[in-house]
Image (cartoon, helix red, strand yellow):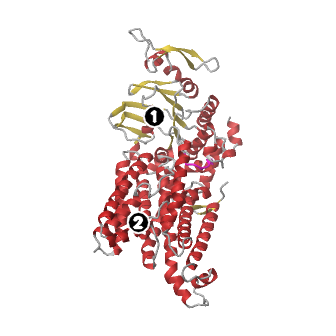
Amino acid sequence: MKDLGRLMGKVEAPPEPAKLRAEGLTLGYDDTTVIERLAVEVPPGRITSVVGPNGCGKSTLLRALARLMRPRGGSVYLDGKEIFSLPTREVARRLGILPQSPEAPEGLTVRELAAQGRYPHQSWLSQWSASDERAVEEALRKTVMLGLADRPLDTLSGGQRQRAWISMALAQETETLLLDEPTTFLDMAHQLEVLQLLGRLNSEEGRTVVMVLHDLNNAARYSHHMIALHGGGVYAAGTPEEVVTPELLRDVFHVEADIVADPRTGLPLCVPYGLRRHPSGGEEG
Amino acid sequence: MRRRAVLRRGGLSLPLDLRAAAVVAGLLGASLVGIVLHVGVGEYPISPPDVVRALLGLSTGDENYYFIVNVLRLPRALVAFLVGAALALSGAILQGLTRNPLAAPEIVGINAGAGLAAVTLIVALPSVPAALIPPAAFVGAVAVAATLYLLAWRGESSPIRLILIGVGIGAVATALTTIMITYGEIEQVSQALVWLTGSVYGRSWEELWPLLPWLALFGSLALLRARHLNALTLGDEVAAGLGVGVERERGLLLLCSVALAAAAVATAGTVGFVGLMAPHIARRLVGPSHGGLLPAAAASGGMLVVAADLVGRVAFSPLEMPCGIITSAVGAPFFIYLLYRSADAK
């Protein structure tokens, strides 16, 4: 893999990974509180997955980490500095975020989309520098989108479109990438394609990746660190082996499951066999 | 592939979309042809070569030509072009901001607000000098836009809410305008009605000069912010993630859109559907990137209104049809087509 990187051109030294953490974080919309006094730390240079059932606040947490929403209480810190005290541009140069199923205007080509990633590096006088051009080409190459670069997004398949959006985030050249369910609406092959791409970005360039994932097995397989949310707080955080347990599945996902070791990787694999049995005897709906 | 040339010198780097530049040049050329034809027709027809000669100040066979062309007819054609350009820019910005192809100043009630203010002045306060009508129309448009902004954006934007509330505000403003017209004095009412139809009839240099600074100022401000508008069309979250000051940029761009629509409506009344159609034509030609889209939309809007006014003058001669009726006759079916298409896509 290292040789491949050298073959494909100059690989810049990975930037010093930023430390992203939150303390006492309370998040909500209107009059509902979704996350309450949560503390979380993102290990730099690693892949972290945030998991949990629908409505547990995974996306909300990701938005707060990306500075897209103001916390009701507590703070998010980037390298020890309160994230809202930093200039918007500086944050955007260090932290890229890909929201869930983003939409591009009709007719926008892949290359034009990727070029948008250069926004925080540009100014009115410098709108398309040589390094902008290089970063966009790099991003398109890494996502294998060079061949489709001049196609409008609306003519592409779901997997290709997701890769195009990732190329935008890559062109942003941030040391940390936050992705909200990057695999939704993708079939299995395309899910793996996206996850492997993120894996390569981490292993070859040392980028910190934080993603919200629905699929526990994918999360266990493709991340070093997992954060399981439950009841507005962190239920468990640690390696996949530490986090993916029958207790987690029962308490957080309301599912009875066996956890077996993946015969290939030894990583935990969850095999659900039923809904959680209630103390009263019935099954939960 | 969209070819572009890049100017790079030191820390300076500016891209130029070659296709968009060619398209804009073509549209401007077509507009120029339209203007020459427009200036040539009338009770006293002048051949296109003579029009060009008179425009350039060269000698023609008839010494009246210079006066007819440059004093009587040219300002009307130029006002038509500028009004079209302003409305088209306004529509293009609004469509980008709302991420909705159906947005246009007349759809979200901005024109109706300008119309209400102007008609109020014409009908209810006839003693006020006519020179105050454009600023009043401007205030009306801004008031509608501000109301819209306050009602539609609750913490985060919702394009559909913006459009629906805009349609509602537009209906209220139109209803109030109708009340003014129903109860007004007949003399003022007929003046107001002509104004409302959207016409460049009888526009002279005196109407043209006040329009220019608005167009120059807010047109170029919008063009300078094209980069930010591009980022905003990807959605608030993506834009914020890219480091865009979302509320600030949206406010500035909305101000541009409103000011351009207001200046246009103040000069020529409510010339309908140009702000809706021209951006679509431009997008077909140069794609969705606003650095090329905005100039192309302005040029197509200008061309549309020049053509509409030309048709209005020639097609039913000796009767003259206001250009607003022509653009609406073409624009309304186009709007229905867009609605039909977007319903299809859902």
- Above or below residue A79? Residue B250 is below
Circle 1: residue type: Ser
Q: Secondary structure at mark 2?
A: helix
Q: Residue at x 64, y 30 (%)?
A: A189
Query: How far across and down, in percent of the image, does residue A169 sit?
Result: 55, 43
Q: Which residue is mark 1?
A: A59
Span of residues in magenta: A104-110
Q: Quadrant of residue A40?
A: top left
Query: How far across and down, in percent of the image, does residue B40 sit?
Result: 58, 79
Query: How far across and down, in percent of the image, does residue B154 sit?
Result: 36, 45
Name the chain under label 1: A
Compare residues B248 and A2 and report the one nearer the observer.
B248
Q: Quadrant of the N terminus of chain A?
A: top right
- Any part of residue A118 in sight: no
Q: Residue at x 58, y 50 (%)?
A: A115
Q: Which residue is mark 2?
A: B196
Asked whether residue A105 is drawn in magenta, I would say yes
Residue that protrudes farthest toward the top in the picture: A281
Q: Secondary structure at mark 1?
A: helix
Q: Left or right of A195: which side holds A211?
A: left
Compare residues A264 and A218 and report the one nearer the observer.
A218
Compare residues A46 and A138 and report the one nearer the observer.
A138
Circle 2: residue type: Leu
> Are the two marked residues, 1 and 2, in contact with CB atoms closer than 8 angstroms?
no
